[in-house]
Image (cartoon, coloured by chain):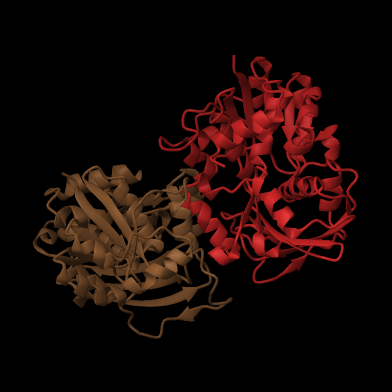
Chain colours: A brown, B red
Amino acid sequence: MSANIVVNGIGIIGKRVAHAIKLQDDMKLHAISTRSASSTLRTLLEPKGPLHKTDLYACSPEWVEKMKEDGMYVNGSLEELLEKGEVDLVVDCTPKKVGAENKKLYKKHGVKAIFQGGEKDTVAKMTFNTFVNYEQASKYDYVRVPSCNTTSLIRLLHTLSQLTKIVEVDVALIRRAGDPPETKGIGNSIVPVMHVPSHHGPDVQTVLPDIDIKTMAVKVPTTLAHVHVFHCEVEKIPKAEKIKNLFKKTPRITVLKAGHGYESTGQVIERYRDLLRPRYDMPEVVVWEETINTQDDDVFWAHMVHPESIIVPENIDCIRSMLGLEKDRNKSIEKTDRSLGI
Amino acid sequence: MSANIVVNGIGIIGKRVAHAIKLQDDMKLHAISTRSASSTLRTLLEPKGPLHKTDLYACSPEWVEKMKEDGMYVNGSLEELLEKGEVDLVVDCTPKKVGAENKKLYKKHGVKAIFQGGEKDTVAKMTFNTFVNYEQASKYDYVRVPSCNTTSLIRLLHTLSQLTKIVEVDVALIRRAGDPPETKGIGNSIVPVMHVPSHHGPDVQTVLPDIDIKTMAVKVPTTLAHVHVFHCEVEKIPKAEKIKNLFKKTPRITVLKAGHGYESTGQVIERYRDLLRPRYDMPEVVVWEETINTQDDDVFWAHMVHPESIIVPENIDCIRSMLGLEKDRNKSIEKTDRSLGI
């Protein structure tokens, strides 16, 4: 018997998580729910769309009629669906703060839920990363998967910490201004994030509490990806070669050479277009090989994060752990990554 | 016996044409040839790449050793391959002016060739468009497929001319600055093309000689697509509804509503990402429904052109006609479009 999953909120993250669930053999996309007849929703449900024939619900009762007026076939509200008691877990991909609000609904109907990194970490007792705490998620009804930037840092720091003790981390995040379909931008500006140090450091600590990390961020007028300029001090310096090799053999970390022509975010994204990845998604964190360097006690590199997709495999693994579908994290990683072509 | 095709030049166009050939059942991608070990070439030939195990040649003898040094498995030069006499046709996708140079090589070895729109129309006696002159290509050894902007205009003008006689056409082309992987751009500028009227008008006339058309172009700092602001005078004005309906039922023309959320190039491209199209390719020309309008003797609309992929189906059809693989243009269109998921 396969687990019944609902994705609530069909935006940049929700549409990917919904599609990824469809690609698994141990869980089932039972339905999706969302608020309005966006161009994305229309496209996904078209005959050639990847969610064609998926049951559609309105995320709250007041949107049912409007969506019907806009030509969508709506089965009712999410609450009506949850009342039937057939749903095992909701992946909440609604906008920031809406998830925390929705938690009441999930509690009322005794359904487990995953929240995204837009929510405060207090939305759930546990913040998840496959490589750090996969097994623990089986103990909780509500778990949070942190955001794209945080996930990339956790993956890399957890991996580096296998080689040496990390003393202090300092990261500059150069963030993309918005997602590709957005029509609002930041002009031709660089916009420093005024909350200093930024929230990413404390967010990393929700999963890796012993890491001393400080982050700052700026937004730049591009839509493809974030780039992190990473620097940390370590207790005993490993050879750069050792770091490169460990990164290369770790799942969901990819090392690319600028010398092979992968010099920029555009050229790296083109790689995933050329591999014919759906939507050119890149759930791997990509580190530029030439930038992995050491000096005195310091380790340096620059990496690239695809904000639209990096958290997709973590959501799938999290479902698997929470519902007891797979106890072994390595088996879950292997299953998820194979299904996504990683 | 399936036709043996070589694609010479593996850039933005060549890699797509090569992959499209692989998707056909009446022709075979015999080999590819190119100049250097670019990131794109490396990606395409990886185990998960769409051209994995395709035979690779250097487009000219002097590049064989360099590509080998760069770690590529090269079978020899294109000339050595052509000498074997197994190749039926070369699709030349090399940079502007290189194609004309290569023609000598194709002539020497008696092999047919298709050139792209970067070459002057004098490179071949015929410039091709599936909807206008499909059958004639069977008479020629060398045919040119015009560029992205020209192809979009030919498709739409040819379609409109089924409803009324076109008196005069006036188009402003708002061109994307460069392709997505490029690292050189135009800053934050709008750059008018100083050659006025632009070459696109005369280029349309190589296929539709009776159309009186004037064009001007500007480049803007975006990579996704071109947009054309189109206006023409006609002899007898058709109802806008009639134009919309004809466009909707014509292959390779898609009409999308801004009112459904497709308001911008970014949102339209997101549609093709959401449809999981390889590389989000959009060989269709997309017309915004709300912009199709008439006033007095004038017809207006705005359309969007995906420069990387719009000419891919025309290349496939052109191969089919030149090699006598299919006499009926409609059957070729149906076959090509089905294989590309259009």
| Residue under the image location 40 percent in, 69 percent down | A65
Q: Quadrant of residue B58?
A: top right
Q: Residue B263: image x %, image y %?
A: 59, 66
Left or right of A32? Residue B260 is: right
| Image quarter hosting the N terminus of chain B | top right
Left or right of B335? Residue A88 is: left
Q: Is residue A189 above or below residue B96?
A: below
How many numbered marks are there?
A: 0
Left or right of A286? Residue B234 is: right
Viewer-closest of A182 and B39: A182
Left or right of B333? Residue A93 is: left
Q: Residue A101: image x %, image y %?
A: 26, 77
| Residue under the image location 63 percent in, 42 percent down | B13
Q: Is residue B39 above or below residue A109?
A: above
| Image quarter hosting the C terminus of chain B | top right
Q: Residue furthest left?
A: A139
Viewer-closest of B231 and B7: B231
Q: Is residue B339 above or below residue A14?
A: above
Q: Residue B172: image x %, image y %?
A: 78, 62
Viewer-closest of A288 and B206: B206
Residue B60 in sight here: no
Residue A32 in sight here: yes
Viewer-closest of B259 and A89: B259
Q: Residue A8: image x %, image y %?
A: 31, 64
